[in-house]
Amino acid sequence: MKRASALLTGLLALALVLGPLTGVVTAQSQGIFIPLLVYRTGPYAPSGIPIANGFVDYFTLLNERDGGINGVKIVWEECETQYDTKQGVECYERLKGKSPVLVNPYSTGITYQLVPKAPVDKVVVFSMGYGMTAAADGRWFPWVFSFPTTYWSQASAVIRYMGQQEGGLEKLKGKKIVHIFHNSPYGKEANPTLEELARKYGFELTLLAVDHPGQEQKATWLQVRRLNPDWIFMSGWGVMNQVAVKEAAATGIKMDHFIGNWWSANDSDVVPAGEGAKGYKGATFHAPGTNFKVFQEIVKTVYDKGKGAGKKEEMGAPLYNRGIVNAMLAAEAIRTAMGKYGNKVLTSEQVRWGFENLNLTEARLDQMGMKGFTHPIKVTCEDHEGNGPVLIQQWDGKKWSIVSEWLAPMREVVRPKLEAAAVEEGKKLNYTQRDCAKEK
Amino acid sequence: MIYRETGQFKSSYASDQAIFPIVQDRVLVLLGIAAAFVVPPLVANEYWLQAVLIPLLIYALAAIGLNLLTGYAGQVSLGTGGFMAVGAYAAFKFATSFPQLNIVVVFLLSGLIAAAVGLVFGVPSLRIKGFYLAVATLAAQFFLVWLFNKVPWFVNYASSGTITAPTRTLLGVMVTGPQASAEARYVLALGLVAVFALVAKNLVRGRVGRSWMAIRDRDIAAEIIGVRPLRTKLLAFGISSFYCGVAGAEFVFLYLGSAETQAFDINLSFLVLFMVIIGGLGSVLGSFLGAGFIVLVPIFLTNAPHLIGLPLPVALQKQIELMVFGALIIFFLIVEPNGLARLWQISKEKLRLWPFPH
């Protein structure tokens, strides 16, 4: 007993003293440092793992094949957040010491934490297709980028798709559309746009919240059954998606009238529902599958050399590909900055310039072996979302395939709201609007 | 040898009733507090302050609050997260509705609102006890979080449902908002927790604390000797919720900067309860030790493999961290069921005999 308590005291003292000490970052990394806030454990791991793997594989490809971006190595470090805001902040603070140029929070909650810190810490927050929609107005939020598109643009594109299927947007009048959302800032993002569009096109919108983590949705689907909606749109994440798809299949919903947003349409979301998931649709801004040259290169330079982050068979899942797109966009932004500042380890200000002046052309995509994989994009000082179009993909029981052409978001609806929201959010943080005419 | 009270005579009631009757204790605590105010802001980097010390202080405050209720008054509560949420949302509403209000006043007011809510949810404690009360307070947890998620008024109709701490200054120094330095926020959090710990320490030594302990140890006996259960239990709920409310307000304003209801979910209630149990039920010091244990050990475990140059995959590392942390909790509870505070007491007794134990 005596020894045990001596040991105990020793252990405690050790933990208390060493705990924070170990957080102190030591050496400056050689290369461009990019922290990766990942979640490979916890209820969101089914979504978190493929993204993280895509990211790491693409960076490995660049480092192995080209020696980095224009010969400057990329250095990254993963930090496990479990999709938890508090752990995410801890990760960010820990990795901040290594002077990162950009951060990919991969959680809207964490993005909301980092948006106010970005200009203070001078770190680019690259929330690709998520995060605070209002921050896509670059005049108010110079450090935040959410291209190729935002939740609001996505919601409007999905409504456009529903209209197309019904035979015209005016046919949506009187139709019942349900939005099932993760009850968090992420899930709620699309609501204002959907409400606006409901007013404009006269459809009946019902908003149904599913509480974190979303394993229990019986009540929600009971409501859906009672409503018998024409279309269902879902903003789910992690384990919530597969539960929803299973419930929908069990409830007897027409699966081809059930559209998930781009975080709710991965292999891991539909496979558990088996046959029932057939026909389920999802939004995306890049193609699924491995039918592109870049994947052959990843197999050749990364997986065949045993350096892959995941399993080779898991390549091509929508979220894996999203990791690739995200890593590619970040790398291209850095490359853009190098065009101006030279091929060296850049500062975060220089990388920010690269993000703001990114012009990803069809030719460049082709060069990278990504022709048709994703849409070209041009970022400007005012527009940090690029207003990218959206695709609809459908699950046929074995794989995803694209079933729509590129759907343009309704910019005329989204942009004014976005600018108004940017003013509001910017004022909350005591920001001032910058004049883009003066930016170079 | 060093720690010996020989020759220290208490010649007045005041010195007999002092919080720290032994001179060495008094000196140590005062030095400790002074060091806590001066050293970290000077030497600690932002990671230490922002990710380690500030949450530690805020959790310690919440743990003191829960300790008053659970440790001293014997009423088990799982509503801590909910009461912290009340404090946070009240502080947000006060700060945004009355921008000229001093931030400390905002914290105190939001504590009062939380106290009022705590009183309401404390009423069932008169009839239900033990585990059943825990379940009743669980209802508070779920109801309050649901309420803040449901009613957009609480978040000033922000579409994302997120509350963001506005920028406020105290004595000319920016203490909240993204531009506030971690040092300023740390000093404010430390100041508040120091004052409230002192208040708590005095509360539990006085009539109120004694009646709480009487209720905890035997409520019928307490009633017979004249302790009124209604007033005593409700007071415990009110004061405990006040502490939790202030901690919740600090949680958003000084630590996270912005938050959603998910930050105040049931896990937070459990976390604070674990702090109280591991630190020591019925001990103010234990609240600090428990908070320290729960905050520091996972961070240490996360960073330990890096430290010894063991590049583990993050997922594996996280699983190991959870397992080791769980094992440590069990180990501590078996070896010292009365918590870390008791351990400290034992080592103090040992120190008195040192270097000649008998």
Image (tube, coloured by chain):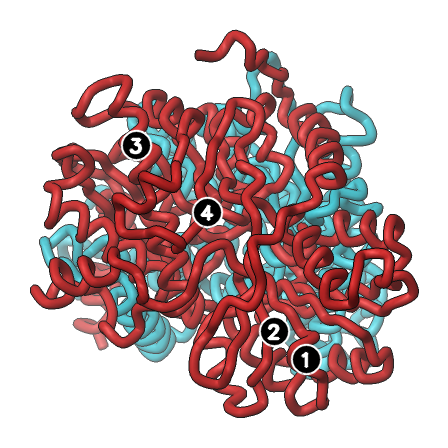
Chain colours: A red, B cyan
Q: Rate crowding at label 2 as few (under 14), some (14 to 19) or many (20 or more) other CA atoms within 10 Å.
A: many
Q: CA distance from mark 4 to mark 3?
A: 19 Å
Using the image, tell me which numbered label, if any, was put on residue A214. 2
**Secondary element at image label 3:** helix
Occupied quadrant, residue A310: bottom left
**Secondary element at image label 4:** loop
Question: Label 1 amino acid?
Answer: Gln
Q: Are marks 4 and 3 on the same chain?
A: yes
Occupied quadrant, residue B279: bottom left
Q: Are marks 2 and 3 on the same chain?
A: yes
Using the image, tell me which numbered label, if any, was put on residue A217. 1
Chain holding disc 1:
A
Left or right: residue A96 compared with residue B276: left
Q: CA distance from mark 4 to mark 2?
A: 32 Å
Q: Give the number of the mark in front: 1 or 3.
A: 3
Residue behind mark 4: A375
Residue B198 drawn above or below residue A54: above
Q: Give the number of the mark in front: 2 or 3.
A: 3
Residue B191 visible in rendering: yes
Q: Tell me which residue sits at (30%, 54%) in the image.
A: A55
Residue A115 drawn at (x, y percent):
52, 35
Chain holding disc 3:
A
Q: Are marks 1 and 3 in contact (CB under 8 Å)?
A: no
Q: Are marks 1 and 3 on the same chain?
A: yes
Chain holding disc 2:
A
Q: Tell me which residue sits at (77%, 53%) in the image.
A: A194
Q: Give the number of the mark in front: 1 or 4.
A: 4
Using the image, tell me which numbered label, if any, was put on residue B101. none
Q: Tell me which residue sits at (64%, 60%) in the image.
A: B81
Residue behind mark 3: A334
